[in-house]
Image (cartoon, grey):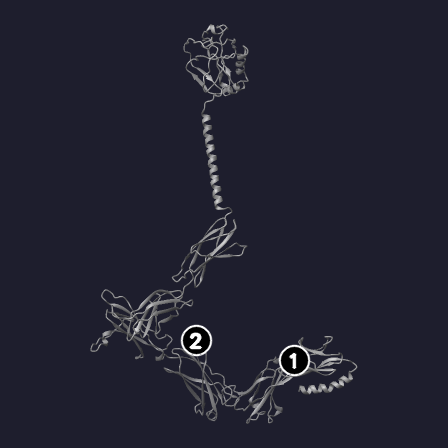
């Protein structure tokens, strides 16, 4: 078609160019092309408006120059081979100016494919098909396409059109097709797809009416179970026996095992049958698993015609086959009691509960010496699965019966107590995987053995066992994170060896356990301590510990702890709130502690201790000083100080008037003013020691600056008093009068008398005749006296 289009373009081009030679137009022809995927096309670019070369682009990408050439100075032809793009834009450009001279769009389409037609039945009544149906594939939107099924035979009537549709299927009644297609011979049909811009026709589908007849689905009449196989019978409805004798049929049996999880894999069994006289077929399906549910379905076809639909499925439960069941008898021997009797627990693999039949079990124990020639020992039935045997060797036998017939049997040997020469395995090694599988490996005994029996339990009541011929085994389907006790026993001939046991082997290690954390915070560090408490018997061993810590605003930090119980976090910020938790890591899992909050101290602990110590010492010092001051003040307060308002200055009478000087005594008090206690009791003075008349009463005085204020009681009269001359005779009188006046706190006992003082000559102390005893005088001393004395 397109080579003709090219010739047409070449034929029209000269006239177009001649007509528009003076117009100097440029363009690309043809426009808006629709081509079939994988076909070829040629595009012409008119270049009258430009000089020089041109170039092409496809979706803005340059096309290789080898794909186009220039026929003359006004036309350039582009050849596209095997075009497969769904839609593309093609443009022609001037090589000199880079301007677009013209363009077009190319859209591809697909023709319908996989056309097939068949005759089929609407119901099982009658032997004549009801419908003629054709279907096909087309990768376009069918809503915009009109499809027509055409008969391409020359013998077809009505211009070959069979049916039309806007879907990818077309259906017509059988009686209508008979008027369009002959019953005999080979026929050919095609489907034409037509849109507003293009049309495409599929490849032809050739057939005979007999080969496109689709049977109605078969019916399963019976599914019978035998001990080793499954017998399936079915029929093809709607076909009389006479028609079955003429044609050849082929059927398939579809069966699969029903499982709880996943999609089962179906198995197909082909059966080729012909000349059936009763319209029924059967097949024996073997190699089925015992006590399993199977789903069965059947389909058939006529000659090489299309397959019918599958029949309705039937599900059956298979029976237990003898070849699929082995009791695998084993025993657990307890320690002998005081009377020598041993309890032997028999264990065997029971028939699955899913099996539909009923089975009975019988356990017997027989002394092993029964096998000795000429000796007959009777067997004893055991109570359920427990047999009582003595210290001798025995044989435990199991018999399984089905409907009073022996279905299976097995026996096991029980060695005698202390039996010697029994082989045993050594060096048992165990390992647990992360999937909960225990791996066993051991060293075989020196004697040759026929195999090994492995029995294991997690609670002592529920036992599991398996037999192997290798020196290694895998224990599967174990309880997760559970300890098992495992025993390996070698087998040889009709006896057993001595079992070797390994205890408390975990099926899988769990998490390390619960992690408890304590924190002791300091100024720039924190002591983190922890303990890991296993929560179960199979808790994993801690292999590493990681401490995570940080504040709310900073990135979380972590550090690996090399100690098993504590770690010190360094370089922390003082007076800051932190959060910390510990992650314990085992080979099979990790455990995290509950986050703990702590706050670092504002000051260093040593500084705080020193500050507290200094403060304590200072307080003690202050208290000590205060206590001393209190004691001294108390002592001072306890001294008797006279009230100055009630005190008097007294003049003591001189015993010797002729003596005018004396040596002062060194006492705690210095000098005092003395006043006569009684004016009438004066002693005569020595006339020879003073120029003044002795009749005058003399008064001696001391410096009034006295430091102590206390009452002095004198028992004896003063022996001598040293008097000092005054500057004037009236000085003493003035002093006394001033002492007793308002300005002095002291009062005189004779304020109205002012004795005349006479200046005496200095003389030596003359012994004076002791006068009569006078009553003790009271002398009052005030602190003011000391002050006055210091002033003078």
Question: Badge 2: few (under 14), some or many (20 or more) residues near its Cα, within 10 Å?
Answer: few
Element marked by disc 2 = loop
Distance between mark 1 and mark 2 Cα atoms: 52 Å
Residue 400 is at least partly visible in this image = no
Q: Position of residue 327 (x, y in %)?
A: 33, 75
Judge left or right: residue 283 versus residue 790: left
Residue 110 is at least partly visible in this image = yes
Judge left or right: residue 388 versus residue 152: left
- Quarter of the rendering occupied by the C terminus: top right
Give the answer, above or below, for where 325 lies relative to 642.
Answer: below
Task: Identify the residue at the far left of this view.
Answer: 374
Q: Quadrant of residue 514?
A: bottom left
Question: Badge 1: few (under 14), some or many (20 or more) residues near its Cα, within 10 Å?
Answer: some
Q: Quadrant of residue 219?
A: bottom left
Give the answer, above or below, for where 707 lies relative to 299.
Answer: above
Element marked by disc 1 = strand
| Label annotation for residue 789 | none
- Quarter of the rendering occupied by the N terminus: bottom right
Q: Position of residue 493 (x, y in %)?
A: 29, 76
Q: Which residue is mark 1?
A: 107
Q: Position of residue 775 (x, y in %)?
A: 42, 13
Q: Nearer the viewer, residue 161 or 196?
A: 196
| Label annotation for residue 259 | 2
Q: Nearer the viewer, residue 575 or 648?
A: 575
Instruction: Please tell me how many numbered marks the rendered image carries.
Output: 2
């Amino acid at each position: 078609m397109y080579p003709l289009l090219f010739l047409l373009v070449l034929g029209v081009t000269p006239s177009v160019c001649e007509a528009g030679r003076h117009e100097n137009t440029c363009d690309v022809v043809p426009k808006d092309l629709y081509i079939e995927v994988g076909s070829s096309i040629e595009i012409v670019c008119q270049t009258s408006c430009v000089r020089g070369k041109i170039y092409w682009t496809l979706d803005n990408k340059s096309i290789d120059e080898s794909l186009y050439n220039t026929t003359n100075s006004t036309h350039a032809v582009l050849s596209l081979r095997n075009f497969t793009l769904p839609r593309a834009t093609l443009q022609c450009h001037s090589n000199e100016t880079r301007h677009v001279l013209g363009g077009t769009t190319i859209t591809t389409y697909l023709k319908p494919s996989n056309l097939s037609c068949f005759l089929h039945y609407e119901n099982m009544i009658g032997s004549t098909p009801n419908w003629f149906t054709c279907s096909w594939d087309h990768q376009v939107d069918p809503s915009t396409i009109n499809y027509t099924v055409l008969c391409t035979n020359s013998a077809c009537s009505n211009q070959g059109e069979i049916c039309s549709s806007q879907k990818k299927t077309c259906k017509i009644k059988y009686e209508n097709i008979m008027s369009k297609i002959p019953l005999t011979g080979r026929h050919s049909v095609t489907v034409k797809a037509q849109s507003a811009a293009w049309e495409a026709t599929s490849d032809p589908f050739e057939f005979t009416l007999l080969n496109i007849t689709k049977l109605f689905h078969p019916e399963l009449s019976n599914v019978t179970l035998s001990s080793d196989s499954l017998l399936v019978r079915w029929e093809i409805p709607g076909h009389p026996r006479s028609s079955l004798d003429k044609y050849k049929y082929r059927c398939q049996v579809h069966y699969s095992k029903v499982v709880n999880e996943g999609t089962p894999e179906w198995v197909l069994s082909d059966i080729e049958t012909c000349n059936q006289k009763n319209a029924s077929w059967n097949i024996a399906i073997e190699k089925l698993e015992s006590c399993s549910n199977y789903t069965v379905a059947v389909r058939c076809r006529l000659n090489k015609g299309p397959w019918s639909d599958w029949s309705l499925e039937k599900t059956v439960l298979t029976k237990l086959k003898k070849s699929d069941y082995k009791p695998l008898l084993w025993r657990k021997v307890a320690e002998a009691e005081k009377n020598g009797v041993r309890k032997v627990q028999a264990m065997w693999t029971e028939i699955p509960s899913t099996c539909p039949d009923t089975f009975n079990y019988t356990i017997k124990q027989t002394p092993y010496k029964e096998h000795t020639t000429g000796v007959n020992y009777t067997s004893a039935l055991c109570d359920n699965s427990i047999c009582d045997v003595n210290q001798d060797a025995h044989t435990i036998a199991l018999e399984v019966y089905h409907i009073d017939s022996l279905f299976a049997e097995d026996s096991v040997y029980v060695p005698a107590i202390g039996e010697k020469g029994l082989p045993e395995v050594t060096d048992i090694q165990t390992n647990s995987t992360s999937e909960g599988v225990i791996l066993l490996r051991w060293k075989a005994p020196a004697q040759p053995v026929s195999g090994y029996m492995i029995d294991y339990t997690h609670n002592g009541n529920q036992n599991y066992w398996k037999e192997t011929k290798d020196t290694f085994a895998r224990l599967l389907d174990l309880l997760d994170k559970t300890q098992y006790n495992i025993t390996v026993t070698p087998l040889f001939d009709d006896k057993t060896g001595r079992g070797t046991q390994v205890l408390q082997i975990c099926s899988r290690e769990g998490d390390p356990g619960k992690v408890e954390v304590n924190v002791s915070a300091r100024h720039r560090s924190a002591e983190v301590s922890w303990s890991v408490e296993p929560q179960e018997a199979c808790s994993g061993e801690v292999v590493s510990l990681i401490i995570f810590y940080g504040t709310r605003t900073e990135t979380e930090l972590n550090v690996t702890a090399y100690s098993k119980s504590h770690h010190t976090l360094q370089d922390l910020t003082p007076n800051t709130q932190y959060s910390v938790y510990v992650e314990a890591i085992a080979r099979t899992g990790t455990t995290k502690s509950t986050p703990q909050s702590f706050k670092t101290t504002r000051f260093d602990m040593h500084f705080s201790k020193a500050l507290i110590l200094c403060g304590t010492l200072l307080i003690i010092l202050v208290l000590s000083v205060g206590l001393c001051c209190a004691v001294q003040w108390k002592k001072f307060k306890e001294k008797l100080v006279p009230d100055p308002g009630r005190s008097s200055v007294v003049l003591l009478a001189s015993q010797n008037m002729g003596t005018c000087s004396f040596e002062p005594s060194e006492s705690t008090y210095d000098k005092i003013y003395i006043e006569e206690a009684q004016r009438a009791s004066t002693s005569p003075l020595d006339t020879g020691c003073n120029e003044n008349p002795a009749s005058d009463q003399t008064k001696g005085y001391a410096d009034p600056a006295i430091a102590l204020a206390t009452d002095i009681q004198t028992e004896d009269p003063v022996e001598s008093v040293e008097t000092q001359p005054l500057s004037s005779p009236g000085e003493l009188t003035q002093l006394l009068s001033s002492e007793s006046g308002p300005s002095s706190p002291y009062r005189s006992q004779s304020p109205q008398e002012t004795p005349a003082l006479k200046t005496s000559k200095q003389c030596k102390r003359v012994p004076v005749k002791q006068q009569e005893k006078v009553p003790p005088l009271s002398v009052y001393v005030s602190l003011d006296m000391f002050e006055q004395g210091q002033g003078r």
